[in-house]
Amino acid sequence: MVDLFGVADLSPATDYIQEQGGEFLGDFPYCISIGICLSDGIVDQLVYHDDPQVQFTYTFHIYHVVTPRLDEIALLITQKLQRKGYRAFPVTATYNPYIEKTDSIVSDAYKLRSIFSHKLPAYLAGLGWVGKNCLLVAPEFGPRLRLTSVLTDAPFPTGEPMEDQCEDCNLCVDICPADALKGRSFSLEEDRDERIDAVKCHHYRRGVLQKKLGSRGCGLCVYVCPYGNPKISKSTPTPKVPGLENS
C-alpha cells in the first residue's frame, strides 16, 4: 500500500541533483515520488526516548519493514516503465556507501549525503513541504513517512510545490537532542548544511544513542511535529522527554 504518490518536474533542481549524485542523473527529467507512512503506534512511543526497546522497535520498523517495501515498489514501477519503452532509475530508499561500509562515526558532512534526495522530488511534486526538521512534511501524515524515488523520462503530468506551513513553529528545533536543527525554512537555492548540522545529528545517533541504547533511530523531530501528532499543536510547549537535558 502506498500513502503518497506524485510526479515531479526536476528541471528547477537539475544542477543541484547532478552536483550531488552525478551528471548521469540529469538524463532523467522527471521523478516519481512514493511515500509510505510510519506506524503511529510506534512513533508515538518515541517520547520514551531512553527506552532501548522503543528505539529498537522504531529503528527496525524504518529500516527493516518500511524501507524494503519501498524498494520493492520502486522496482515494480521501474519494470513497468521499461516494458512501456521508457527509461527508469530506481533510487534505493536508504543507502549511503560511507556509512554502510563502516561502523565508525563520519565527521564529513558531504559524506552524510546519499546519491539523491528523496525529499526534493516529493516537494516538487506537491506532496508536502520540507520542514525545519529537514524532512518532508505532508499535511495528512506530517513527517511520519519514508520516501523513495524513480527517475524516468516518462512524461507524466507533474505536481506543483506546496507552500511551507511551519510558520513560527520550532518544536523540532527545540527538542533536538543533538542541537542539529538551525530553524531555517527550506529553499531550493540554499544548501542543506544551512538548515541542519548533519554531523551533529549523525554523531548523536551513531555515537550517543547507539552506544547507550544499541539503536540509532532517535526520531524526536518526527514525533513532535504537530502535523503528524494530533496531541500537539504549534503552541504546545516542547514535550518533556525522559533522559534528555532539555526535559
Image (tube, rainbow, N blue to C red):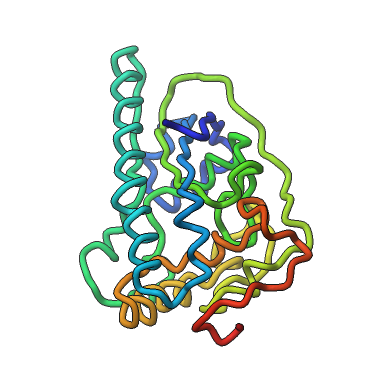
Task: Judge from the rendering whether residue 183 lies leftward or rightward of residue 106; answer left or right.
Answer: right
Image x and y of residue 163, in percent: 73, 44
| Quadrant in the rendering for residue 193 | bottom right
Q: Residue at x 66, y 38 (%)?
A: 161
Image x and y of residue 223, in percent: 55, 61
Q: Which quadrant is home to the N terminus? A: top left
Q: Residue at x 35, y 28 (%)?
A: 88
Counting the numbered discs, the total is 0
As displayed, is residue 106 above or below residue 161? below
As displayed, is residue 128 above or below residue 197? above
| Quadrant in the rendering for residue 199 | bottom left
**Residue that lies at the very extreme toward the bottom in this rendered image:** 245
Q: Which quadrant is home to the C terminus? A: bottom right
**Residue that lies at the very extreme toward the left in this rendered image:** 101
Image x and y of residue 72, in percent: 29, 34
Task: Judge from the rendering whether residue 193 lies leftward or rightward of residue 73; answer left or right.
Answer: right
Q: Residue at x 45, y 47 (%)?
A: 146
**Along the viewing direction, whichever of 93 and 87 lies nearer the viewer:** 93
Image x and y of residue 144, in percent: 52, 51
Q: Residue at x 33, y 70 (%)?
A: 215
**Along the viewing direction, whichever of 161 and 73 lies nearer the viewer:** 73
